[in-house]
Amino acid sequence: MNRIILIKYGELTTKKSNRKFFINTLYNNIIKKCKDLNVIISKDISRMYIEYESLDEELVIKRIGEVFGIHAYSIAYKTLTNLDSIKSTIREIIEDLDKDKKYTFKVETKRSYKKFLMNSMECNDEFGSFILKNYKNFKVDVHNPSLTFHVEIRENYSYVYLNEYKGIGGYPVGTLGHAMLMLSGGIDSPVAGYLALKRGIKLDLVYFEAIPHTSLEARNKVIELSKKLSIYGGEMRLIIVPFTKLQENIYKNVSENYSITIMRRMMYRIMEKLTLRFKSLAIINGESVGQVASQTLTSMSVINNVTNIPVIRPVACLDKLEIIDISKKIDTYDISILPYEDCCTIFVPRHPVINPVLSECIKMESTFNYEEMIDEILANLNIITITPDMDKNKYDDIL
Ligand code: ATP
Ligand code: MG
């Protein structure tokens, strides 16, 4: 029997005018995801069909479980569009079931090929009678059947399947523009990135590092997290920002309790420049209201004051435990809890301000020439191309 995967788009079908763009993006994303497998993918306005080598079935299912924009899928049997072929496919499906078990069933036909000789109701009756006549252990139950035979009738081929599985949902990555994710080694920012990808946003990643105060292990941890995001987001750039000199100057020139606030204002200033340089539309980060002193609403507003670029905070209103649940699901948790210092954690003040005052920030920032340092930073970025299976050792020597 010819098994194929039949994909249902879900949410994207509500975006009528963009439908073609959404479908084409999803199609390209699936092709990229399966590029090392022998698959043939075809599409129409409501379905996508993946044909594959039978040995690869499990692998193909795993891969499509990592592609946003897939609402549901089924393992379907492809057959010619005529009554006899469809019946013999139903027969084959039943022959695979337990012969000694009793089943209740219904048939649900969708007929997008309107020239077919019967309408959907007539098809349901025809296939239902066929099953009843040939299999004594089958009984009709249209309300609560143990099996539903789905039959989709299209012009050349038709598809028969029993079960529908939930896909990962969301929008295809790339359909909702491009943004830059501030990716630290913590738990929150990879989750924020995952949620942004789920809404169809294509990402590049930005990591601020302060070598020698932070280690290469800390960077490798961020690379490992990036690889996990790349499973869902495809190839992405990881931009490594050399933050040491600016950070040292912050601690030298501003009051200790304001150092985190001002450091984050500097990060946002750099993010704004990167967003423009990489033709991006928004900044994404893992800030969560109330989590630390720099994430009170007052702090967020004073920090955000340096830029007009939209800042999206996908985990802003989630509890830490909810964030941790997602990080476990996407397999970033165990990497995030590795104990390497991040540039945010090395110079933590004893009493960070919870309600910083904007004019104070501006006054302290005017005491040193941070703009020149930002220009220097922007001239010395390291950019790494991330893919899920990249070899990170290749990058051990860039400093
Ligand atoms: P996370 O929030 O990811 O668990 P964290 O708790 O160490 O990491 P916070 O101090 O809460 O980070 O910072 C809030 C957000 O700022 C992070 O989620 C991340 O988006 C961004 N951020 C912090 N440090 C860095 C860094 N070194 N490089 C890039 N982004 C960072
Ligand atoms: Mg955090």
Image (cartoon, rainbow, N blue to C red):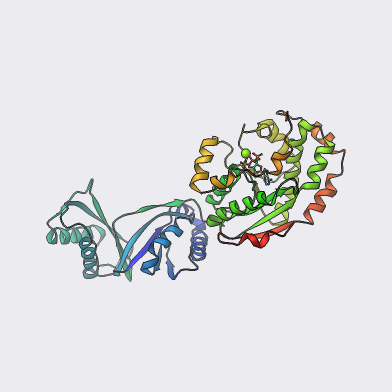
Residue occupying the point 78% across, 43% down:
247
Residue 46 visible within the image = no
Counting every numbered tag in the picture gives 0
Specify whether 4 is left or right of 268: left
Res. 387 image quadrant:
bottom right
- Residue 217, position as x, y percentages in the image: 66, 50
Residue occupying the point 85% across, 49% down:
372
Residue occupying the point 56% across, 61% down:
389
Q: Quadrant of the C terminus?
A: bottom right
- Residue 329, position as x, y percentages in the image: 48, 46
Specify whether 313 is left or right of 259: left
- Quarter of image, ligand 1: top right
Q: Quadrant of the N terminus?
A: bottom left
From this view, report whether residue 287 is shown above or below residue 170: above
From this view, report whether residue 242 is shown above or below residue 286: below
Specify whether 145 is left or right of 172: left
Between 115 and 301, the one lying in front of the other is 301
Between 309 and 265, the one lying in front of the other is 265
- Residue 220, position as x, y percentages in the image: 64, 53
Residue 161 visible within the image = yes
Res. 364 image quadrant:
top right
- Residue 49, position as x, y percentages in the image: 40, 65
Residue occupying the point 80% across, 49% down:
374
